[in-house]
Structures are given as C-alpha cells and as structure tokens.
Image (cartoon, rainbow, N blue to C red):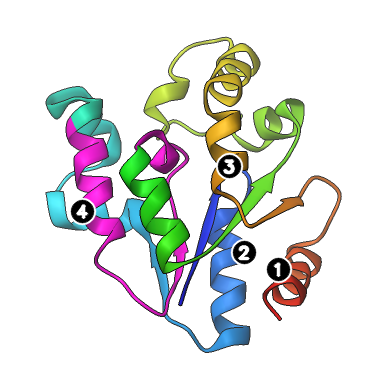
Amino acid sequence: MNIYLIGMMGTGKSTIGELLTEKLDYPFVDLDEKIEKSAGKSITEIFENDGEENFRNLESEQLRSYSDSVISCGGGIILKEENRTFMKENGKAVLLIASISELSKRLMESDSRPLLAGEKKEELLTNIWLERRLHYLNTADYTIETGHKTNEEIAEEILRHLN
C-alpha cells in the first residue's frame, strides 16, 4: 500500500514524507525529484519548454511507478481524474493543509515554483487553492492541518490515522 501525501506547495509533503519513511521503513519517493531526474531538467524548465500538460503527463507516469512507498506528490497531481482514481485504488491519500498566509511565508524565497511566478503570491495561492480544493478533499482519506504543528506531530498524526 502506498501513502500519498497531497496538498498545496509549501505544506511540507517532502519533509513529512521523509519523516514517515523512517517510522514505517517504507521507501520515500518525491515525485517532483523523479520527474526532474527522468526528464533531465528542472520542473521550471519543463513548464517553460514543454508546457504544463507535458509536465502533468510525466507526473502521471511517475505516479504509477511505485508501490509500498511514501510518495510526496506535486501539488497539481489531483488535477487529473486518472491520478485521483489511481491513488484511491492503490493506497491512502493524506491531505496536508495550511493557511494561505502560512504558505506564502513558507514559499517567500522560492524561485522554483513555476505557478507562483509573479509578485502577488497570496493571490496566486488563493486562486490555486480554490481551483483544486474539491479535488484535494475528494481524494484525501485524511486531512491534517500543518500550520501550528511540528513535523514530528504531523507524522505521528498520520501514523495514528493509518493504524
């Protein structure tokens, strides 16, 4: 069974995923890293040179490549119905959420987020959340608020839900 960590960029999916693998003795997979490695270029370069649709196809392909793993998914993985269905059929999806202001603070210095190119990060994040919210909620088996918790507390909460 896979454990899929889903949610907006900046919610801590990769950090929490690495913590969970230590506790579960599952391999950790960061889908964005795997996509970059297989494509031989950064996500920003894929978006700029090949387009978002091509990136989403690479993302779907990578999603299907792992079993019995903790998988940190890119924020847009839930945009494709086939991905949402695949996650439901092949594991448990945990939605990590945080307030828009918290996400904006966490992503303030990030320049590797192609969907956040621009000055108005909070507005962009709000629009992305509104576009994806129902897909996140309908895909998730569990939802965990990450704003005022330590990484350890979040990982422990996920483990309690899984058991």
Say what secondary structure mark 3 lies in: helix
Q: CA distance from mark 4 to mark 3?
A: 21 Å
Quadrant position of residue 136: top right
Mark closer to the chain start, 4 or 2: 2
> Circle 4 sits on which residue?
61
Circles 3 and 2: CB distance less than 8 Å? no
- Residue 42 place in picture, x, y as percent: 25, 42
> Circle 1 sits on which residue?
158
Q: CA distance from mark 4 to mark 1?
A: 26 Å
Say what secondary structure mark 4 lies in: helix
Mark closer to the chain start, 4 or 3: 4
**Magenta-tinted stretch:** 54-80
> Circle 2 sits on which residue?
16
Q: CA distance from mark 4 to mark 2?
A: 23 Å
Mark closer to the chain start, 2 or 1: 2
Q: Quadrant of the C terminus?
A: bottom right
Circles 4 and 2: CB distance less than 8 Å? no
Q: CA distance from mark 2 to mark 1?
A: 9 Å
Amino acid type for the residue under numbered disc 4: Glu
